[in-house]
Amino acid sequence: MKRRIQIADDSPVQEPMLPLINIVFLLLIFFMIAGSLQKLGPFDVNPPASQTAEIQPEDTIVLWFGKAGEVGIDDQKGTLENLSSFLPVDYIGRPVEIRADRETDGVKVVALLKRLQELGIDKVQLMTAMEAEQE
């Protein structure tokens, strides 16, 4: 015996919402992960402005240099004297990008460059922010 199910034609069809919720949730997770890929330094710096920019090699060591003379690499920070203790083991031959604050005294930056030279680092670049074009 067959049973017939009677469906009223005048009622709206309910679309399942679960696939839409899943897609929105996956997009949310993707953008949360993709938005946090940039490494943050141990402290904030405000870089000086420049007119040109170059792409850095993948093996570049990013060195943060603050107004007060503090130095940081990744999440470690210290002074110029103990800089060698938190440099990577394979730092020889790798380029170093200095991210110094624009208000840092030039004498301190020269002292940092001398210290890097003492440690055998010869590829050094100073990171700057792109200057806005004036109309």
Image (cartoon, rainbow, N blue to C red):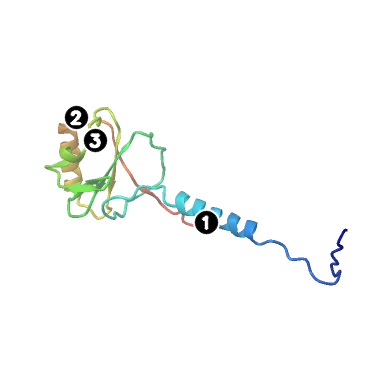
x, y (%) of residue 110? 18, 42
Per the image, the residue denoted by label 2 is: 120
Q: Quadrant of the N terminus?
A: bottom right
Q: How many marks?
A: 3
Circle nearer the N terminus (2, 1): 1
Residue labelled with disc 1? 28
| Amino acid bearing label 2 | Gly
What kind of element bears circle 1?
A: helix
Q: Which residue type does callout 3 highlight?
A: Pro
Marker disc for residue 88: 3
Q: Compared with residue 17, is residue 36 higher up or lower down, i.e. above or below?
A: above
- In the figure, 93 relative to 5: above or below? above
Identify the residue at image location x=20%, y=48%: 77
Q: Residue at x 77, y 66 (%)?
A: 13
Furthest residue toward front: 1
Q: Nearer the viewer, mark 1 or mark 3?
A: 1
Tag 1 near tag 3, CB within 8 Å: no
The foreground one among 127 and 34 is: 34
- Rate crowding at label 3 as few (under 14), some (14 to 19) or many (20 or more) other CA atoms within 10 Å: few
Q: Quadrant of residue 116?
A: top left
Mark toward the start of the polypeptide (2 vs 3)? 3
Q: What is the three-letter code of the residue carrying label 1? A: Leu
Q: Secondary structure at mark 2?
A: loop
Judged by depth in the image, the label closer to the viewer, 2 or 3, is: 3
**Circle 3 sits in a helix, a strand or a loop, which is it?**
loop
**Mark 1 or mark 3, which has the lower sequence index?**
1
- Mark linked to residue 102: none
Q: CA distance from mark 2 to mark 3?
A: 13 Å
Q: Nearer the viewer, mark 2 or mark 1?
A: 1
Expressed as whole percent of the image width and height from the top left, the position of residue 75 reads 26, 48
Give coordinates of residue 87: x percent, y percent. Answer: 21, 37
